[in-house]
Structure formats: C-alpha cells, structure tokens
C-alpha cells in the first residue's frame, strides 16, 4: 500500500471509521506481533501489549507527522509500550514472589504468517532471544526492519555510537554461540564416526 492510500485510511480512522482500523491493523499486525514477541520474555504478555499498542495508535493518530514513515512512527509506539510494560513488570516483580509470577505460561495466538519459517531461522531466533534486551532490540530493528543505524538511534533515543556498539556486541555474541554450536556438532559427528 502506498502513502497516498495509507493517508486516506488514516484520515478515515481519525474520523472514526471502524473499517479503516481493520485495514491498518491488517497491514501492520504481523510486524507488530513479531516485534513484541521478540522483545517480551513472557508469551502470555504479547496480546496485552499489542492491544495497548493499537489503543495508543488510535489515541496518537491525530498527532502523527505524515512526513515521517508510518511504520517508523508505529515502532515508536511499540517501543514505548514495551518499555511501559517492562516497568510495570518490574513493579509487580518487586511486589510478588517470582515463582508465582512465572509459574503459568499461556499459549499465545499468533498471526498466520510465521516470522521465521525454517529450522535455521528458528534457531537464530532462539539465539537472538537469549541476548540481553538492549542488544536484542538493536538487532531486531537493524535486521528484521532493515532500519539504518541512524534510524535505530532516533527510534531508541540513544547515541549513534551506542547503536553501533550494541549491534557489534550482539553480532559478536551470536557468532560466538554459532561457532560453539558448530564445534559441538562437529565433535559429536566425529565421535559417532569413530564408533562405526
């Protein structure tokens, strides 16, 4: 969908057209769900956060600067909601026992389009999920959204050098984990061949 069509749907949404919300939701839900799922540790929280993101989108839409890309603006909302959720989670953590808070994991319904389709991609997603949040968020915006270092710095409101440093550290850690896995697999194949 081009910007002209998008602006028509955004105008209709501002005017209260529920069909416009469905169209915009349909255009963005896969990216939003995938981003939230990649940045949130507990799958049970994903639907709540996504609901809040779309509520905030509806509230903030009249102030949207049409000179900026819509997806970039929407990701700003995603980041703020995830940060807000993380603060709330920390407050709850301090008030409740960790065991009670983490004991129940619910199944989360995901959009039809899987973010990662093959085994190698799933393995990479698993490794990315093991990165600290500050590194993981940079990797997701750099490689899943193809944002430039400058765009990631603007979105996260951190210096450009920090983005580059976090990107470098994350890639270094991922390479280290992948090398370790490759060495372990090569070692196990060598052992199996020796038994034959």
Image (cartoon, helix red, strand yellow):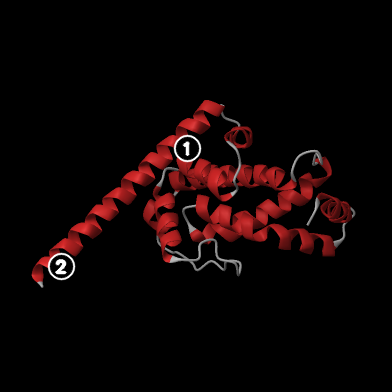
Q: Find the distance from the CA under tag 1 to the CA under tag 2.
A: 37 Å
Residue 88 visible (yes or no): no
Marks 1 and 2 close (CB-CB < 8 Å): no
- In the picture of the structure, the residue carrying the numbered disc 2 is 192
Disc 2 is placed on an element classified as helix
Residue 49 placement: quadrant: bottom right
Residue 37 position in % (x across, y down):
53, 56
- In the picture of the structure, the residue carrying the numbered disc 1 is 167
Please, which residue is most extreme toward the left here?
195
Mark 1 Cα shell of 10 Å, populated few (<14), some (14-19), many (≥20): many
Q: Nearer the viewer, residue 123 or 45?
A: 123
Residue 110 placement: quadrant: bottom right
Quadrant location of the C terminus?
Answer: bottom left
Left or right of 61 in this view: 163 = left
Q: Name the disc covering residue 90, or none.
A: none
Residue 155 visible (yes or no): yes
Left or right of 72 in this view: 139 = left
Q: Give the total of numbered labels.
A: 2
Residue 187 position in % (x across, y down):
18, 58
The mark lying in front, picked from 1 and 2, is: 2
Residue 176 position in % (x across, y down):
32, 44
Residue at 10% in and 66% down: 194
Residue at 36% in and 45% down: 175
Is tag 1's residue or tag 2's residue first in the polypeptide sequence? 1
Q: Nearer the viewer, residue 41 or 25?
A: 25
Disc 1 is placed on an element classified as helix
31 up-or-down from 137: above or below? below
């Amino acid at each position: 969908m081009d910007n002209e069509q998008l602006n028509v749907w955004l105008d209709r949404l501002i005017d209260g057209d529920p069909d416009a919300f469905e169209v915009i939701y349909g255009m963005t839900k896969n990216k939003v769900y995938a981003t939230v799922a990649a940045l949130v540790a507990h799958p049970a929280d994903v639907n709540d956060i996504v609901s809040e993101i779309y509520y905030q989108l509806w509230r903030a839409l009249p102030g949207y600067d049409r000179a900026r890309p819509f997806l970039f603006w929407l990701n700003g909302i995603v980041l703020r909601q995830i940060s807000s959720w993380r603060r709330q989670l920390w407050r709850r953590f301090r008030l409740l026992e960790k065991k009670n808070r983490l004991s129940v994991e619910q199944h989360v319904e995901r959009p039809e389009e899987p973010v990662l389709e093959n085994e190698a991609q799933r393995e990479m997603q698993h490794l990315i999920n093991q990165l600290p949040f500050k590194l993981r968020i940079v990797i997701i915006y750099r490689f899943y959204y193809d944002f430039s270092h400058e765009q990631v710095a603007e979105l996260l409101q951190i210096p450009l050098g920090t983005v580059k440093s976090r990107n470098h550290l994350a890639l270094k850690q991922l390479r280290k984990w992948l090398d370790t896995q490759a060495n372990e697999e090569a070692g196990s194949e060598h052992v199996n061949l020796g038994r034959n």
